Amino acid sequence: MHFIAIARGSRYSPNHVGNDSKILALTIDQIRAKGHSVSVYDEDQLRPDLIKTPYIFSMIRGSRSLKILQEVEKQGALVVNSTSGVYNCYRENLARLLPKAGVNIPTTLVLDTQKKIENIPFAGKPFKVWIKRGDVHAIHREDVTLVYSIEELTEVLHEYHRRGIGAAVVQEHITGPVVKFYAVKNTPFFHFYFHDRTTALPFDTAMLMDMAQRSAEVLDVDIYGGDAVIGPEGDIRIIDLNDWPSFAPVRDEASKWIAKVILEKAEHHPAEVFISTLSL
């Protein structure tokens, strides 16, 4: 089989360009080692005429290239992660979809960045909430910010609006250590660690795995990772979930499982519809 691999645009990998490149390169190596060929493009290079195969794996985050992949999906191509999965990982969509799957998240509001905000009922005393851009993950420093007043929150909302960001997510601040996790759906691969290893505490790891799996199902992502906060009573809340993260601490092992999932999905994917569409 011939595959297309699409690298993430560097602006969507702040501080992680090298790590994102490495996990994609290792996945490509795994697939080539199984006897398949792979053409590689950056998401900013992608054009519809470059796609001549129904087998695509992609780290794309930007809407321009996602729209191209949406069209080839409609024509019958396989895209891993699916474009719907990538869009579902936009933060305003996470806030809507995860609770529907019974996944605990902090109290959250999705706000229009043009509207005036008078009050955040869960801000606490003293005032303390997170504000995050509602679409793609952080590109600039202000895209995920802890703010300490309604005035500061309003200032960030105005900044988002000036940058063309239409929605923002405001989220309750939860006190507790952060656990980072990486997973590949429908495989045994699941890795987690405390972001600050000096604050580790016991918690129900099976519950975290279950929450991660339910998140992946409702979001329709196969390759994913995220962050969770462990509360003082061991309660777990998912605070972020990413389509195809860097897997930096475990990329060698993760790439094997990622490639396995891509190959299995390709082997069971009916390519004839896409091929016949190309021939029209």
Image (tube, rainbow, N blue to C red):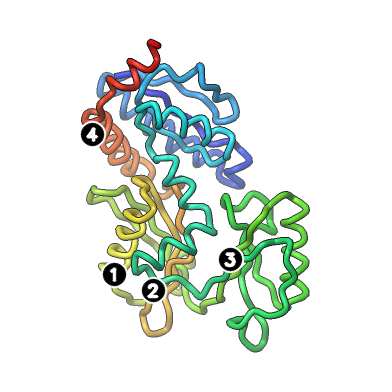
Choose between 245 and 116: the one closer to the eye.
116
| Badge 2: residue crowd in 10 Å (few <14, some 14–19, many ≥20) | many
Dot 4, crowdedness within 10 Å: few (<14), some or many (≥20)? Answer: few
CB within 8 Å, label 2 to label 1:
yes
In space, the residues marked 1 and 3 are separated at their CA atoms by 27 Å
Out of 175 and 81, give the one closest to the viewer: 81
| Disc 4 element | helix
- In this figure, which residue is indicated by the disc labeled 1? 207
- Residue at 61 percent of width and 70 percent of height: 130
Rendering quarter of residue 270:
top left
- Mark 2 or mark 4: name the one nearer the start of the chain: 2
Three-letter code, disc 3: Val
Q: Quadrant of the C terminus?
A: top left
Q: Earlier in the sequence, mark 4 or mark 3?
A: 3
Image height of 96 relative to 148, above or below: above
Between discs 1 and 4, the one toward the N terminus: 1
- The residue labelled by disc 4 is 264
Going by the numbered disc 1, the residue's amino acid type is: Met
Looking at the image, residue 97 sits to the left or right of residue 45; the answer is: left
Q: Amino acid at mark 2?
A: Ile
